[in-house]
Amino acid sequence: LNFLIAHYLSQGALREAAEPLRRLMEQKPMMLPPRIDWQGQRHRSDYEALARSHPHVSTNELLRVMQARISGDTSLMTSGGTVLGRTRRRPSDSVRNALTTKLRRRQGTTHVQQLPLTMAGGMYRQLVRCHGHKYPTFCVLFDRTGRRMITGSDDYLVKVWCTRTGYLINTLKGHQDVVTDIALNTENTLLASASADGTVRVWNVRTGEPRTVLVAHAQGRAKGITGVKFSPAACDELRFVATACDDGLCRLYRWSRSRLAVDAEPIVVDGRSQSRDAVSSFAFNHTGSRFAVATTGGYVSIYSMLADTLGAPRLVARMAAHEESITTLVFSADGTMLLTGSIDGTARVWTCSGGMRWDAVTFDIKEPPPVAEMPVSEPNENLEGPAEPNQNAEASQNAEGQTEPNQSQDATGSRPTLPVKRVETNQVAWACDGTRVLISNNIGTVAAFDPHTGRECWRRRGAHGTSEV
């Protein structure tokens, strides 16, 4: 607040009034927030340093905040255009994380409506509502105690909330692009946040202080980080922070449980079968002794972390798991089986039968897609007047990039319909006891299968309409 006041006074006729305030802030550094470096050390800050590190905060920011408050916005976290640590620039559209990319694409469409909780929805009630992010939030998880919830948003911020009261505990600042993934270690002491700015920031969960910053490309153009995970291993040699990057590589950084420190030099794992492949998913088993990487080319590579040198990943198997890109990859609870899902509409459970050989059980959830009607506006619904026809829009592209005729209205003038969707596997998961696998697709279907025989146990469709699950 002191910075915003001095920033506002530094313009126009009030410039002379800002000088005494700035001198006072230099004499009393507690009037400004301290700078915290990547090692968690605090440093004194001054007005000039804050102005240089936050160039997106204009001199009129305080005025915009007050105007928003007067107009009824009750939260200073979203009042005005920006606050320290965030930007007015719109989120990046170049994030390749499979799940968050789908969610961002859906968030921008107009025909997706918010659906209530279904099936067991009557058993749930809202406990608290957490409000504070400026842009959409696609990364959410609970800590190991269930007392804190952590969110990562497209406003470049990571926030820690109390699940009992909904109060904000910490705001973690530092990323310069959208947050793509967040992860907690098993000990509940470290939080890692990945961003499209090419960095992974590791934070102390209890204090909120930064522990380290991991940079995939120290030189040249930064590649976005699409995922981050902690290894659940118990011994120091197998404790890793694993990251996936837009360059198609995974990087493993060792970390110390006693020092809460992370090594800056990574072990690079290349799970690509071709140079143009990208990592779409990766996972550790429950002991951290195996590490699996899935790619957009449909390949899965499995590494053993118990090679001749402990903690050095050794490739033990690489198979063409699916015909197209893999969306999700998950180990079973006992670590003996691996579940994969693909946009080709199938999922597979893989079991090692000895040596380099892995046998698969396939589940197919492809089905005839529904034909949904597009909403038609009433004659007086458009208050801004009729839109001008686009004479150049003779064709449009579907999700696969194929050109098809413009279907905004057919020759008979009847109500148009949505293009037929391609049925894809979105998410896969294991039941806690490992006796069932759950698979969802992009037309609202959820199904359960026996992982050993491939028998379909049940299938439900319609609870979510025709929206992606």
Image (cartoon, rainbow, N blue to C red):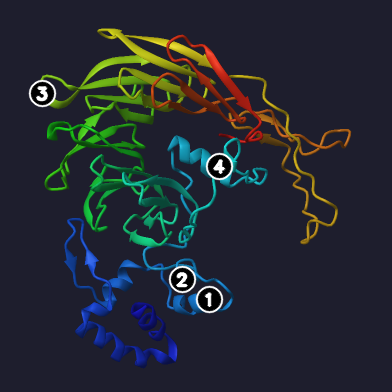
4 or 2: tag closer to the N-terminus: 2
Report which quarter residue 345 is drawn in: top right
Marks 3 and 4 sit apart, C-alpha to C-alpha, by 51 Å
Count residues near mark 3 (Cα–Cα under 10 Å), then give few for <14, some for 14-19, many for 20+. few
Number of the front mark, 3 or 4: 4
Residue under circle 4? 123
Q: Nearer the viewer, mark 3 or mark 2?
A: 2
367 on left or right of 350: right
**What amino acid is at disc 3?**
Thr
Q: Nearer the viewer, residue 256 or 463?
A: 463
**Label 1 belongs to which residue?**
69
Q: Which residue carries the number 3 mark?
A: 309
Q: Which mark is residue 76?
A: 2
Q: Label 1, label 2: how many angstroms apart (C-alpha)?
A: 8 Å
Tag 3 or tag 1, which sits nearer the N-term?
Answer: 1
Structural distance between the alpha carbons of marks 3 and 2: 53 Å
Which label's residue is closer to the chain start, 4 or 1? Answer: 1
Q: Amino acid at mark 2?
A: Leu
Cα–Cα span, label 1 and label 3: 60 Å
Viewer-side residue, 138 vs 315:
138
Mark 3 or 2, nearer chain start = 2
Identify residue type, mark 4. Answer: Met
Secondary structure at badge 3 equals loop
Residue mark closest to the camera, 4 vs 1: 4
Q: x and y percent of residue 221 in the render? A: 32, 46
Element type at mark 1 = helix
Q: CA distance from mark 4 to mark 1?
A: 37 Å
Look at the image and tell me in which quarter the N terminus lies: bottom left
